[in-house]
């Protein structure tokens, strides 16, 4: 496929679609196999993905290069992400949990994890567009922050999220590296 502009759409999924999310995530994170410090994304099973989706939600990104055609076959799955709401008790969907939270105190937030774009589609703005979609959803739910935790090395993912408006809040240790995990957040309107 050339570099023609892509039209994107976002499909919200739940744990019923764990198999497709797991299969795509393995492809999206394949580049991490070359690093000595492993990515936990690559050791997750389909069951792990199902459990994670049951506690939050997922978004799959579909793309088409020819907007003239709207047949189902013209859409390709190109990326995805999982969402978590720290305030959500098990079994409550994200929107309900945030609505309940807003009635009580301020400061509701949404977190995302395992964002990926399939290798053949990377570098075409899909990741940035997906983050903007999450920002819109989070703002419509009344969240004050959108949060993510990223690797600080192998590779260092912080510059990517800095460019998308995220700032570092704190670090934690992993693999005996004191700041291996960087926590970042983007304030919302
Ligand atoms: C990170 C990822 C989701 C970005 O998606 P994408 O659609 O390729 O990103 P965009 O097209 O919006 O942005 C591409 C730009 O980001 C840069 N970029 C990608 N990863 C980067 C990183 N780790 N650090 C700094 N810049 C990075 C690219 O070099 C490119 O730069 P350019 O615009 O100057 O050419 C994708 O590369 C991916 O799936 N990687 C493997 C899985 C992963 O690392 N996920 C993130 C876990 S926190």
Image (cartoon, rainbow, N blue to C red):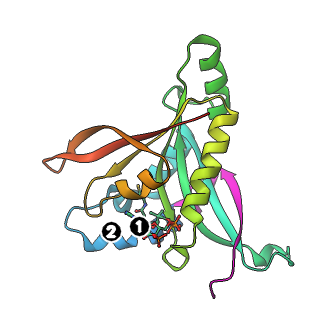
Judge left or right: residue 96 versus residue 174. right
Q: Residue furthest bottom?
A: 2
The residue drawn where x is 64% and y is 70% is 77
Q: Residue at x 62, y 37 (%)?
A: 138
Which portion, as a residue range, is magenta? 1-21
Ligand 1 closer than 8 Å to the CB at disc 1?
yes
At numbered mark 1, what does the secondary structure look like: helix, strand or loop? loop
Q: Residues within 10 Å of mark 1 (few under 14, many from 20)?
A: some
Q: Where does the N terminus fall, quadrant-wise?
A: bottom right
Q: Marks 1 and 2, how far apart in space?
A: 6 Å
Residue hosting label 1: 29
Q: Are marks 1 and 2 in contact (CB under 8 Å)?
A: yes
Image quarter where ligand 1 lies: bottom left
Q: Position of residue 96 (x, y in %)?
A: 67, 27
Measured from the top left, where is residue 134 in percent x and y? 61, 47
Q: Position of residue 181 (x, y in %)?
A: 28, 46
Q: Which residue is mark 2?
A: 32
């Amino acid at each position: 496929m050339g570099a023609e502009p892509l039209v994107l759409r976002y499909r919200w999924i739940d744990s019923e679609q764990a198999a497709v999310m797991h299969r795509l995530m393995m492809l999206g994170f394949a580049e991490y196999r070359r690093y000595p410090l492993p990515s936990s994304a690559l050791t997750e099973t389909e069951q792990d993905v199902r459990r994670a989706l049951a506690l939050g939600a997922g978004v799959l990104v579909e793309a088409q290069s020819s907007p003239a055609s709207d047949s189902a076959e013209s859409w390709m799955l190109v990326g995805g992400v999982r969402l978590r709401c720290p305030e959500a008790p098990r079994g409550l969907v994200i929107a309900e949990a945030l609505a309940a939270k807003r009635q009580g105190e301020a400061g509701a937030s949404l977190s995302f994890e395992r964002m990926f774009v399939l290798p053949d589609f990377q570098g075409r703005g899909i990741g940035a567009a997906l983050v903007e979609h999450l920002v819109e959803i989070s703002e419509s739910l009344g969240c004050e922050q959108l949060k993510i935790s990223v690797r600080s090395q192998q590779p260092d993912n912080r510059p990517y999220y800095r460019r998308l408006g995220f700032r570092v809040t704190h670090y934690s240790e992993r693999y005996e590296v004191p700041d291996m995990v960087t926590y970042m957040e983007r304030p919302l309107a």
